[in-house]
């Protein structure tokens, strides 16, 4: 059984290496920036040499194709077996998003680490906080984060995959990341307090639980191999994707504020 799981796991690495599209990561980072404490802002500014969180939010995706970083692809997601919850899941040391978040947040907090190392840790952390909030980055092991080409999106004639729909088609708009952030950056004090308390595992479990919405295709698609997603799917799910972006931004700020006190 163990060998089978290992085989499936490694065979899925290339298939599941997508992430939220550039813009979604930038929106998360803009929201985080708006919620940083003064101290955290200064420290981030120092670490990033004047760049903003939104400038580096996609760095971790841009390096994945380089051979020296090919091992980092698996840090962008995790695959949970059918019927498992995140608490049943065994973290793959060196090999999944939960491990990577803990690892890089630890490096970021370690004042004894050289600045370059902490800068790199910050750049990974900022990206991965976004990724783990995309429900299909906590995928079912059986479907490889749903990267199969089995979906038609509204009036687009191409065959796409569900992962792409959640990566950016749901939230596609002509707004800039700053404008989009402004549009969705509303949360109550109570919401922010609750969101801030959640652990990395909680974030993953929330993504997993959202699969009930992600895979709700409506009666017309019942038993169909090619799933047609229409305006109804978008109307139902865009608010969910936007809430995940907002939560990711608020939580990123919360963690950075406590790292840089
Ligand atoms: Zn990613």
Image (spheres, rainbow, N blue to C red):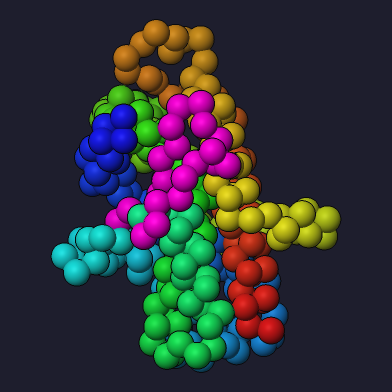
* Nearest to the observer: residue 146 or residue 156: 146
Range of magenta residues: 73-94
Residue occupying image coordinates x 30% and y 49%: 17
Residue occupying image coordinates x 24% and y 66%: 69
Q: Percent position (x, y) of residue 77?
A: 40, 49
Specify the quadrant of the image occupied by residue 1: top left
Image vertical order of residue 7 relative to residue 46, above or below: above
For residue 256: magenta? no
Q: Is residue 52 left or right of residue 202?
A: left
Q: In this view, does 261 lie to the left or right of 67?
A: right
Residue occupying image coordinates x 56% and y 79%: 109
Q: Percent position (x, y) of residue 45?
A: 53, 87
* Nearest to the observer: residue 241 or residue 123: 123
* Nearest to the observer: residue 115 or residue 93: 93
Q: In which quarter of the image is the C terminus?
A: bottom right
Image vertical order of residue 116 relative to residue 164, above or below: below
Specify the quadrant of the image occupied by residue 212: top right
User: Taking the image as drawn, is residue 29 in sight?
Assistant: yes
Instruction: Provide the major secondary structure of the magenta segment.
Output: loop
Specify the quadrant of the image occupied by residue 164: top left
């Amino acid at each position: 059984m163990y060998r089978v799981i290992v085989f499936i796991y490694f065979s899925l690495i290339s298939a599941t290496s997508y992430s939220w599209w550039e813009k979604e990561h930038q929106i998360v980072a803009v929201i985080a920036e708006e919620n940083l404490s003064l101290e955290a802002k200064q420290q981030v500014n120092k670490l990033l040499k004047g760049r903003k969180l939104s400038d580096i939010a996609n760095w971790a995706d841009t390096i994945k194709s380089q051979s020296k970083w090919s091992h980092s692809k698996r840090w962008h997601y995790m695959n949970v077996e059918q019927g498992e919850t995140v608490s049943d899941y065994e973290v793959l040391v060196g090999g999944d998003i939960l491990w990577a978040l803990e690892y890089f947040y630890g490096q970021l907090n370690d004042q004894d680490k050289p600045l370059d190392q902490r800068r790199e840790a910050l750049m990974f952390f900022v990206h991965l906080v976004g990724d783990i909030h995309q429900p299909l980055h906590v995928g079912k092991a059986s479907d490889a984060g749903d990267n199969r080409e089995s979906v038609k999106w509204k009036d687009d004639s191409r065959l796409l995959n569900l992962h792409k729909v959640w990566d950016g088609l749901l939230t596609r708009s002509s707004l800039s990341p700053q404008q989009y952030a402004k549009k969705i950056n509303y949360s109550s004090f109570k919401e922010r307090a609750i969101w801030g308390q959640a652990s990395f595992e909680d974030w993953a479990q929330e993504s997993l639980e959202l699969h009930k919405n992600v895979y709700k295709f409506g009666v017309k698609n019942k038993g169909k191999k090619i799933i047609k997603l229409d305006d109804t799917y978008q109307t139902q799910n865009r608010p969910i994707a936007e809430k995940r972006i907002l939560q990711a931004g608020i939580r990123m700020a919360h963690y950075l504020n406590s790292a840089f006190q």
